Image: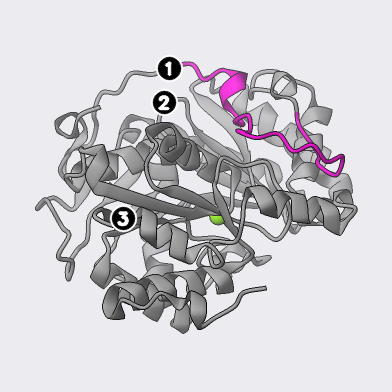
Amino acid sequence: MTKKAVVVSDTKSEMEMTIVAVSDSSLFRAPVQKPSSVGYRTISRKKLPHCGGGGINTWVDIMRASSPTHYKSNISSQDHLNSWMLRHPSALNMFEQITKASIGKQIVMFLDYDGTLSPIVDDPDRAFMSDAMRATVRKLARYFPTAIVSGRCTDKVYNFVRLAELYYAGSHGMDIKGPSKGSQYKKTAQSVLCQPATKFLPMIKEVYKTLLDKTKSTPGAKVENNKFCLSVHFRCVEEKKWSELAQKVRSVLKDYPKLQLTQGRMVLEIRPTIKWDKGKAVEFLLESLGYTNFTDVFPVYIGDDRTDEDAFKVLTERGQGLGILVSKTPKETNASYSLREPSEVMKFLQLLVDWKQFNIIPTQLITYA
Ligand SMILES: [Mg+2]
C-alpha cells in the first residue's frame, strides 16, 4: 500500500481497489495465545459461515458468544480471570513499563468509539461520550496524533466526539478523514484521505432499504446505515428471535456475493469484500502521518470489539506499539494489555497526558487494584 494509491479528494466518486474473496478463515482471527481455562467459549474458525454458507445455528452460536450475558455465564471462577489478567495485565498497572517502551518514539493514539470511549447502550443512536471523556481526548490530541477508528460512519462518530483536531476512520476504516482544524499533526490539505469502497455505495444503499423492510417484523432489531457498511443491532432483540433475524439477514445477502457478513459486539455487520479493515486503516494512517520508520513510532490502539483485533494483530506483526482490549471478562485477543471499561480508558488517557505534560510517572501516586 502506498499513500499515493489511496488518497482521493472529496469530489472523486470512485477509485479502483482489488476485490478479493474473503475466506471464512479470516472472519474471526485466531488468538495469539489460547487460554487453557475451560471457561472460554471458542468458535472454531472452520465452523464460521460466510454469508453464502454455514448453518444458521452456527451464526446463533456466534451471536450468543458475543452476548455480555453469556460471557458472564461462561466464566466460572476468579481463577480464570486472574489467569487471563496475567497474560493481559491492566494498562493502568503497567503504565510505567508502557511509557518506558515509548521513550524516543512518537506515540500515536488509535481509539475505537463504542464500548471504548462511550458505554454500550441499548439504543446505538444514544451512545454518547461524557464531557469528561471528550475533554480528556481533547487534551490527548494536543500531545499525540489521535485517531478515532469506528464501525460507524465517519459523520456519525464525529457527531458523537465533536473534536475537529482528530483523525476519523469510520466504516471500519473505509472512510478516513483528516483533522478539519486545530491539529499540529495534520500532514495533508485533503480532508478525505481514503475511501476504498466508494464503488459499493449504491449496492449498500439498496441492501439497507431491503434490510429495513425485512427486519421490521423483528421487535428490537435496528438497522444502521454506516455509509460503507451496515449494522444490524440485536442487543434489544429477544434471544429466541436471533435465529430468525440471522436468517433474514442471510436471505438478503445471498443475492450480494460482493458483500460479507461479520459479527461484532451484539451486532451483525455487512461490508464489502475488499481487503480493508481497522488494521489496514491503522497502517494507512501511520503512513499518512509520515511514520514509515518502525523505530520512531509507538502506536497505541484501544478497542473492545472483534473488529479491533485486526488492528491489534497489525501492531503485533509489526512489532510496534501495543494493543489494549477493553473488557471486564476474559476474551481471546491479540491485545497485550487490558482495561475494564471506558472509565479506565479515560484514566489511562489522562495518565498519558500528565506524563507528557508534567513528566509524571504515576506509579508511586496511584494504585490500581
Ligand atoms: Mg467498540
Residue shown at 81%/50% (left/top)? Answer: 80
Mark 3: few/some/many CA within 10 Å (<14, 14-19, 20+): many
Mark 2: few/some/many CA within 10 Å (<14, 14-19, 20+): some
Residue 21 position within the rendered picture, expressed as x and y whole percent measured from the top left: 48, 16
Queried whether the magenta region covers residue 152, the answer comes back as no
Residue 189 position within the rendered picture, expressed as x and y whole percent measured from the top left: 9, 53
Q: Quadrant of ligand 1?
A: bottom right
Disc on res. 274: 2
Q: Residue lying at the far left in this picture: please name it.
A: 189
Disc on res. 58: none
Residue shown at 50%/67% (left/top)? Answer: 117
Residue shown at 36%/78% (left/top)? Answer: 360
Judged left or right of residue 208, residue 220 is: right
The one of 221 and 27 positioned closer to us in this rendering? 27
Q: Which of marks 2 and 3 is nearer the N terminus?
A: 3
Residue shown at 67%/73% (left/top)? Answer: 369
Whether tag 2 and tag 3 are in contact, CB under 8 A, the answer is: no
Whether tag 2 and tag 1 are in contact, CB under 8 A, the answer is: yes
Give the residues in magenta. Answer: 21-43
Q: Mark 1 sits on what residue?
A: 20
Residue 187 position within the rendered picture, expressed as x and y whole percent measured from the top left: 12, 52
Mark 1: few/some/many CA within 10 Å (<14, 14-19, 20+): few
Q: Mark 3 sits on what residue?
A: 108
**Of circles 2 and 3, which is in front?**
3
Judged left or right of residue 136, residue 69 is: right
Secondary structure under the numbered disc 3 in the rendered image: strand
